[in-house]
Amino acid sequence: MSKRKNWMERGHQKLNTQSSATIKYVTLQANRERFGLNPGTPGGDLLDNEVIPKFTAFNDAFNAWKDKNSRNIVVTAELHDKEKDFTKVYRKLYSILKATPSVANDDLLNMSFPTRYEGNGTPSKVENEAPSYGLDTSVLCRIRVFFYKTGDKLHSAKPAGQRGAEIKYAILNEKPVNRNVLTLSKSKTRSPFLLEFALSDRGKIVYFTLRWENTRGEKGPWSPIFSVMVP
């Protein structure tokens, strides 16, 4: 996220992904207590009485709109209305959380929000160490690539000031000597990446590399090139 007032993701899909991450994280009981969002508090009442109900309405409308078989003018108008209602209270929630001392920058990043580095003249740093990674190949033709800060025992944390990670990958017959031949790429704010392949790709080798991207869009160094077989 860049230094701009409108930090909110644009587009129904991107906003739904961003806000889903926020709701999932902020509604964990341990986080509610740590952030002072218990029932009866101003933030807690905002969360329970406005944010969650309006997110649920927006999410339901989005899922209906996402189904191309049922999408029509009425469904689309309903999505626009529910999204507009939700974004008003979503901004309020971010303002409260950003002003809460117990909410760390890493918490804001885990909720897909800008950190406090944004807007106060102090830029987010460019991470000088590439992400560590883990792999899950338990599902046929799917590879999940987890990314996390090196040394993080829970394999879930991003370095402070980092919006997410970028992956470049490709199926190749031999290990590449440079990254230019890794022609496919994705960016993601939350781990893991999901790479999906055709049945005909089973047994082939995927080569990939990772790097961090900070909240200003600046990129860190690439990791070494790794490989995994398509399950």
Image (cartoon, helix red, strand yellow):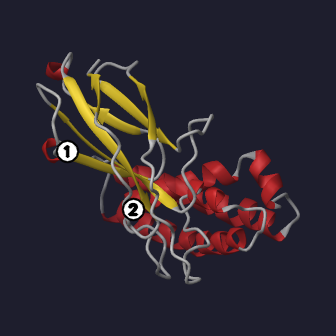
Element carrying mark 2? helix
Element carrying mark 1? helix
Horizontal side of residue 129 vs 27, given as left or right: left
The amino acid beneath tag 1 is Arg
Q: CA distance from mark 2 to mark 1?
A: 32 Å
Q: Residue at x 81, y 55 (%)?
A: 34
- Is residue 127 or residue 167 the one in the foreground? 127
- Is residue 123 or residue 96 the one in the foreground? 123
Q: Residue at x 78, y 62 (%)?
A: 102
Quadrant for the N terminus in the image? bottom left
The amino acid beneath tag 2 is His
Neighbour tally class for label 2: few under 14, some 14-19, many 20 plus, Cα within 10 Å: some
Q: Is residue 68 visible?
A: no
- In front: label 2 or label 1: 1
Which of the labelled discs sits on residue 12, or is there none? 2
Q: Which residue is mark 1?
A: 179
Q: Position of residue 42 (x, y in %)?
A: 82, 71
Q: Residue at x 13, y 26 (%)?
A: 174
Horizontal side of residue 173 vs 10, given as left or right: left
Q: Is residue 69 above or below residue 137?
A: below
